[in-house]
Amino acid sequence: MVLAGDWQATRSVIIEFRSQQRALISTTSDEYQAIAEDRNAGSTVTSRLVKGL
């Protein structure tokens, strides 16, 4: 249920990191970028960093 705004996503993925620093290190790594290249070729991606889930 969307409480406010417009949400058209058909699926969501939540990944937990120990800290903001670890999230940034992980998502900018060469290994992650190699995987993200394939993912981005086949989908539309919006990524958000949310603190405190």
Image (cartoon, rainbow, N blue to C red):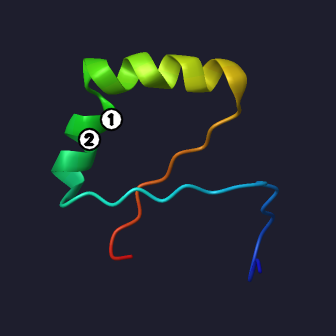
Give the vertical position of 19 relative to 38 (above or below): below
Give me the C-alpha separation between circle 2 and circle 1: 5 Å
Helix, strand or loop under label 1: helix
**Quadrant position of the N terminus in the picture:** bottom right
**Quadrant position of the C terminus in the picture:** bottom left
Quarter occupied by residue 3: bottom right
| Left or right: 49 as drawn, with respect to 46 | left
Quarter occupied by residue 24: top left
- Within 10 angstroms of label 1, few (less than 14), some, or many (20 or more) residues? few
- Label disc, if present, on residue 24 of the rendered structure: 2
User: Where is residue 5 shown, x and y percent of the image?
Assistant: 77, 70
- Label disc, if present, on residue 27 of the rendered structure: 1
| Left or right: 40 as drawn, with respect to 25 | right
Please, what is the three-letter code of the amino acid marked with disc 1? Answer: Thr
User: Where is residue 14 shown, x and y percent of the image?
Assistant: 48, 59
Helix, strand or loop under label 2: helix
Q: Residue at x 18, y 61 (%)?
A: 18
User: Where is residue 19 shown, x and y percent of the image?
Assistant: 19, 59
User: Where is residue 29 shown, x and y percent of the image?
Assistant: 25, 25
Q: Residue at x 27, y 17 (%)?
A: 30
Give the vertical position of 35 relative to 7 (above or below): above
Q: Residue at x 26, y 57 (%)?
A: 17
Quarter occupied by residue 11: bottom right
Q: Residue at x 30, y 21 (%)?
A: 31
- Within 10 angstroms of label 2, few (less than 14), some, or many (20 or more) residues? few
- Label disc, if present, on residue 52 of the rendered structure: none
Q: Nearer the viewer, residue 38 or 45?
A: 38
Q: How many marks?
A: 2
Please, what is the three-letter code of the amino acid marked with disc 2? Answer: Leu
Determine contact: label 2, label 1, CB under 8 Å. yes
